[in-house]
Every structure is written in C-alpha cells, then in structure tokens.
Amino acid sequence: MAFAPLVGFASKKAAQIAAYLLSKQPNMEKLKLIKLLYLSEREFLSRHGHPMLYDEFYSLKDGPICSSSLNGLNGQLDTEYWAQFFVIGDNKRNFQLKREFARDDLDEVSDAEIAAVEGVWERFRDFSASEIRNWTHDNCPEYTEVESGRVPISYKDVLDALGEKNGEDVERGVSQKRRISALLSL
C-alpha cells in the first residue's frame, strides 16, 4: 500500500542517505537502518539547528523513528525511486545495497549532511540492531516508552533533549516549510 508523501518531506534525500548508510554495510537489518536515519537527523539538528529530511518523529516500541523514512524503507513511498538503491531481503527485515554508487549520485545530500551521517556511522557501525535500539531507549530523552502504537516526538522535544534552546523556532520553521510546500504543490 502506497502512502501520500508528507508535505515537505525530502524523500529522495532520505533514500540517498539510506543508500549511503547501506554502502557502509551492504546487508543491514531494517531496525538498525531506521535507527541510523533517526540518529543522523538528530545529529544534523544538533550541528546545524535545522532538519535534513523534514520528517515526522515518533516513539514506537523499538524506539524513536523518522516516520516517512520508515514508510520509504517499507516500500510505501516513491517506490521506484527508493527501490533503485536497495532491495528488501526475503525476511523483510534486511536491506541489501542494489548497486555501488559515487558521491555524485547523492545529488540531494549536501557535504554537511554527509558529515553528520558519517559521524553517526562512525559511532554506531559496530552496534547490532538490538544494541542501537537499546542505546536510543537509554540516551534519547525525547523518546517515550510505548508498548504498542506510537507517540509523536516534536522537533522541539528533540532539540530540548539535546540541550538546544531554539526548539520552538525550529518547530515553527518546519511548519512554515510544510505550508509553503503545500501551497507550491497546488
């Protein structure tokens, strides 16, 4: 089932960042990949005070996630675009890089974004999926423990957890970008 994309969400950039992460470990569990995407967005927010992906965040049983990015990984968003980078394994839990690519193929991703993603990769590359899941539970104060369903996490929540003071400004900026994107898509 395909979902309508979240207005303002940088779907192509999210797919390219997922592919970049998979280029580091060409066969990766979905749980690890979605955690790395979340932590990369969190790291970029910390470094630059604005998001890369303009995704929505949620607390799920297995920790915080970027919701639209997860939809893309699950084949529910821009399926042709996302599918050019990786294939989903038979068990639906692993992703495999479909092809090698050069930096020029990541035309949606800036050097500053690559640097943030690379920093997250360096820190967490040796973590298993369950270890990174547990790390997010213990070290992401914006996360709310849930048994089922999902609880929204705001940009302000993330920035507050990071000790940043501009969370409300970033939240307004994200809302404004979504409004402008919605108007431009009419």
Image (cartoon, rainbow, N blue to C red):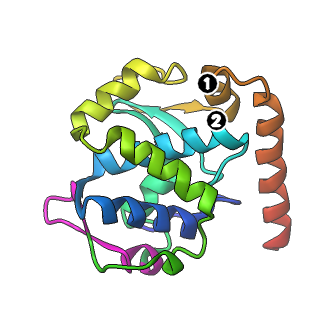
Above or below 167: residue 127: below
Q: Earlier in the sequence, mark 1 or mark 2?
A: 2
Q: Quadrant of residue 102?
A: bottom left
| Alpha carbon separation for disc pair 1 and 2 | 7 Å
Q: Which residue is mark 2?
A: 46
The answer, for residue 90, to whether it is visible in the render is yes
Q: Quadrant of the N terminus?
A: bottom left
Along the horizontal axis of the image, is 122 left or right of 150?
A: left
Position of residue 62 measured from the top left corner of the image (x, y, whole percent): 33, 32
The residue at 61%/44% (across/down) is 44
The answer to the question of whether label 1 and label 2 lie on touching residues, with beta carbons closer than 8 A, is yes
Q: Is residue 53 above or below residue 23?
A: above
Residue appearing at x 48%, y 68% in the figure: 16
Provide the residue designation for mark 1: 162
Q: Pick whichever, 53 or 46, lies toward us.
A: 46
Quadrant the C terminus occupies: bottom right
Image coordinates of residue 104 in percent, x first then y, are 53, 80
Q: Which residues are magenta?
A: 80-96
Q: Is residue 6 above or below residue 186?
A: above
Q: Is residue 42 left or right of residue 126?
A: right
